[in-house]
Structures are given as structure tokens and as C-alpha cells.
């Protein structure tokens, strides 16, 4: 998953930044690059999952 080929597919296949340093396709240089990465423990995800999903559903169904 950290091979250059896989990481080069991430930007246009999953629409997220790759975790390793690879050349990005044209257009990515104009995007704002996040300065902070969010990381959660499995316990945090388990306890917050439904709240996050509900908030996301409300946001996208407006």
C-alpha cells in the first residue's frame, strides 16, 4: 500500500492525499494542503461513530 504505484493512484482514486511523498497530478498544487492530520483510537471511533455519521447525514441532506 505504500508503493509508489499505489500511492500515485490514491489522489485520483480516493480523492485524498497519499501518505508518502509522490508527485501529485496537475491541479493538486492549487488546493489547500491540511497542516494537521486527525488520528483516532479504535475506542474513540467506536464511541463517536454514530454521532459523526448522523452529523454527516444532516450536512449532506440539506
Image (cartoon, rainbow, N blue to C red):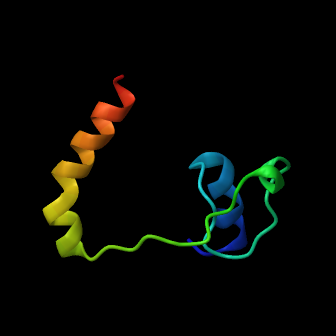
Farthest residue toward the left? 47
- In this rendering, the count of numbered labels is 0
The residue shown at (27%, 42%) is 55
Q: Quadrant of residue 19?
A: bottom right
Q: Is residue 18 left or right of residue 61?
A: right
The residue shown at (21%, 71%) is 44
Q: Is residue 55 left or right of residue 21?
A: left
Q: Quadrant of the N terminus?
A: bottom right
The residue shown at (82%, 47%) is 27
Q: Nearer the viewer, residue 2 or 26?
A: 26
Q: Nearer the viewer, residue 22 or 3?
A: 22
Where 38 sits versus 48, above or below? Answer: below
Where 15 sits versus 56, above or below? Answer: below
Q: Quadrant of the C terminus?
A: top left
Q: Is residue 5 left or right of residue 10?
A: right
Q: Is residue 21 left or right of residue 2?
A: right
Where 28 sits versus 38, above or below? Answer: above
The residue shown at (22%, 41%) is 54
Residue 24, given in percent of the width and then of the height, sits at 79, 59
Q: Quadrant of residue 47?
A: bottom left
Farthest residue toward the right? 26
Residue 2, given in percent of the width and then of the height, sits at 60, 75
Residue 50, given in percent of the width and then of the height, sits at 17, 50
Q: Quadrant of residue 23?
A: bottom right
Amino acid at each position: 500500500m505504500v508503493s509508489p504505484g499505489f500511492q500515485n493512484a490514491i489522489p485520483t482514486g480516493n480523492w485524498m492525499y497519499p501518505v508518502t511523498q509522490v508527485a501529485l497530478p496537475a491541479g493538486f498544487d492549487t488546493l489547500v494542503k491540511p497542516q494537521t492530520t486527525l488520528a483516532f483510537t479504535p475506542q474513540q471511533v467506536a464511541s463517536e461513530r454514530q454521532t459523526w455519521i448522523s452529523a454527516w447525514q444532516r450536512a449532506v441532506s440539506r
